[in-house]
Image (cartoon, rainbow, N blue to C red):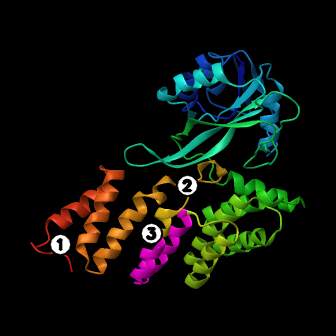
Amino acid sequence: MPTISLCMIVKNEEMHLVRCLDSVADLVEEIIIVDTGSTDRTVEIASHYTEKIYAYSWKDDFADARNESFSKASMDYCMWMDADDILEETEKENFLQLKQTLPPDTDIVMMRYNTSFDEAGRPSFSYFRERWIRNCERYRWTGAVHEVIVPNGKVIYSDIAISHKKMNAGDSDRNLRIYRKMIAEGKHLEPRQQYYYGRELYYHKQYEEAVSVLEQFLRMEEGWIENKIEACSVCADCYDQLGQEQAALNVLLRSMSFDLPRAELCCEIGKYFLEHGNFHNAIYWYKAALGARKNEYAGGFFLPDCYDYIPFLQLCVCYDRLGDWQKAREYNEMAGTCKPYSQAYLYNKQYFDSLPAGSFDKK
């Protein structure tokens, strides 16, 4: 059975660290903590779990810090987590089962990363990340921000999920500050970093600059297809915020030049037409979302609700606006099969129950 070194970089994580380590400490053979300058009880807390705690001078480079943590590992695989991540209790048996059955020639294990949750606590936003990485010089992190180890060798996908559950806001300006510093120092942003720089500008509501950066990224011959499709979505919202609705629609449609339509983008196009009162076009795109191929393993960001719940709910709205309450109610019930606890579904159900008798007669 393979052995695992949990490798973490931390700073001022006294609020999160116990929860994180308690969730996984008994499943790994070694815990490596690289502290980047904590001034709270982080190091003291970590000392209750491991003696392997190392001080590190922060260099505005997450890849360098993570590589430092990997360099201290002595087990077969390195596993990374952030302090505000947890392995849910329901995942532990699967985690142990994977250790017992992992093919010995595996280089990287990709696991789900759940980063947003709905009102019932179910994941509403997730994607796959490299989580167990063979401990060798071949695998090292790159990228000062949004660091990555590019999957290669024998890669397997596991449905085991790490959940990101932050309890405080943190430094929301940190990533943008690092990118600004890199640019000021004349450093070249490779395509992936260009994409994430554009996202950081978007998060900071610097929409014009974000559009410029993301459009430049979309024109690059290099760049991962998943990033380009997601860049179209972010760029569209920037244009929308700038009042350039046609440009927003154009860049959403442009996403389909990179690959087959994704449900996430179909829903955004449907929303455009719904908001403009073109219900028939909106219906077309929401139905396209329902028919889109669900490929969770492509590696990009994945919004599961866009493949059923959201288009069902929005088709309910479209048919209601067209006066076809029979179809509207049918689609609302379909949304309810996905999320019976949804406040939107329950509100719509109450609305349909209040309509006069005969409203649902076939037309």
Badge 3 is on which residue? 287
Residue 285 spot, x, y in % from top left:
48, 73
Rate crowding at label 1 as few (under 14), some (14 to 19) or many (20 or more) other CA atoms within 10 Å: some
Apparent side of residue 328 relative to residue 30 in the rendered image (left or right) = left
> What is the magenta segment's predominant secondary structure?
helix
Image quadrant in which you'd find residue 250: bottom right
Rate crowding at label 2 as few (under 14), some (14 to 19) or many (20 or more) other CA atoms within 10 Å: some
Residue drawn at x 28%, y 70% as measured from the top left: 327
Cα distance in 3D space between marks 2 and 1: 33 Å
Residue 116 spot, x, y in % from top left:
50, 48
Badge 1 is on which residue? 360
Q: Which region shows up in magenta?
A: 263-287
Rate crowding at label 3 as few (under 14), some (14 to 19) or many (20 or more) other CA atoms within 10 Å: many
Badge 2 is on which residue? 294
What amino acid does circle 1 point to? Answer: Phe
Apparent side of residue 360 relative to residue 60 in the rendered image (left or right) = left
Which of the image's four quarters has the N terminus?
top right
Confirm or deny contact between disc 1 and disc 3 (CB under 8 A). Answer: no
Residue drawn at x 11%, y 74% as measured from the top left: 358
Image quadrant in which you'd find residue 236: bottom right
Q: Is residue 206 visible?
A: no
